[in-house]
Image (cartoon, grey):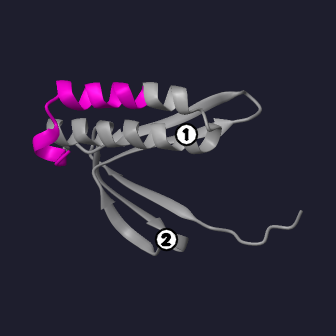
Amino acid sequence: MAVKHQSKVIFEVELDENRIPEKMNWSADDAGIDHESAEAMMISVWNDEKKETLRMDLWTKNMKLKEMQVFFYQSLKSMAEVYRRATNDEKMTETMLDFVDYFHEKLELDKFTGE
C-alpha cells in the first residue's frame, strides 16, 4: 500500500548540565503548531513486535506541583475518552472516569480546572 500522506511531529528538549529538561517545544505540521512551548509531555508508543508500550515522560524543572496534578487529571480523563473511542467499552470507560473524578476531588483541583 502506498503512503498517501506523511506527517511530522517534532519534540525539542533543552537540558541543563544535569540533563534535566529546562525548555521543551513541539511542532506538528498538520496541526499548524510550530515550536509551541510545553512544560510536560507523556508520549506512549506501542511496539507490536514486543507487545509492549514504550514511554517517554518529561517535565521541566519549572513545572509546579498543582500544574502537574492538573496535567495528570486532564491526561487521565483524555485517556479514558480515547479508550471509549477505541474499544466502545462503556462499562470500563465509566470505571476509569469514576477514578478520574476521585483523583480530581481528592486533589481539590476544582479551583484550578473550573470543573
Q: Is residue 82 above or below residue 37?
A: above
User: What is the crowding at mark 1: few (fewer than 14 residues within 10 Å), some, or many (at least 20)?
Assistant: some
**Residue situated furthest front in the rendering:** 91
Other-residue count near label 2 (Cα within 10 Å), few / some / many at <14 / 14–19 / ≥20: few
Q: Callout 1, which amino acid?
A: Arg
Residue nearer the viewer, 79 or 2: 79
Report x, y in % for residue 30: 55, 72
| Residue bearing the label numbered 1 | 84
Which residue is rendered at x = 80% and y = 67% of the image? Answer: 3
Mark in front: 1 vs 2: 1
Magenta stretch in the rendered image: 96-115
Query: In the image, which disc is placed on residue 31?
Result: 2
Tell whether label 2 touches label 1 (CB within 8 Å).
no
Q: Left or right of 115: which side holds 26?
A: right
- Which corner quadrant of the image does residue 59 belong to? top left
Please say whether residue 12 is one of the residues in the magenta stretch.
no
* Secondary structure at numbered mark 2: helix
**Does 13 sit above or below residue 72?**
below
The quarter of the picture where residue 58 lies is top left
Decide if residue 20 is in sight here: no
Percent x, y of residue 76: 39, 36
- Asked which quadrant contains residue 49, the reply is top right
In the rendered image, the quadrant that contains the N terminus is: bottom right
Lower sequence index among marks 1 and 2 = 2
Query: Viewed as shown, does residue 53 lie left or right of 114?
Result: right
* Residue 104 belongs to the span the image colors magenta: yes
Residue at 44% from the left image edge and 24% from the top image edge: 95
Q: Main secondary structure of the magenta part?
A: helix
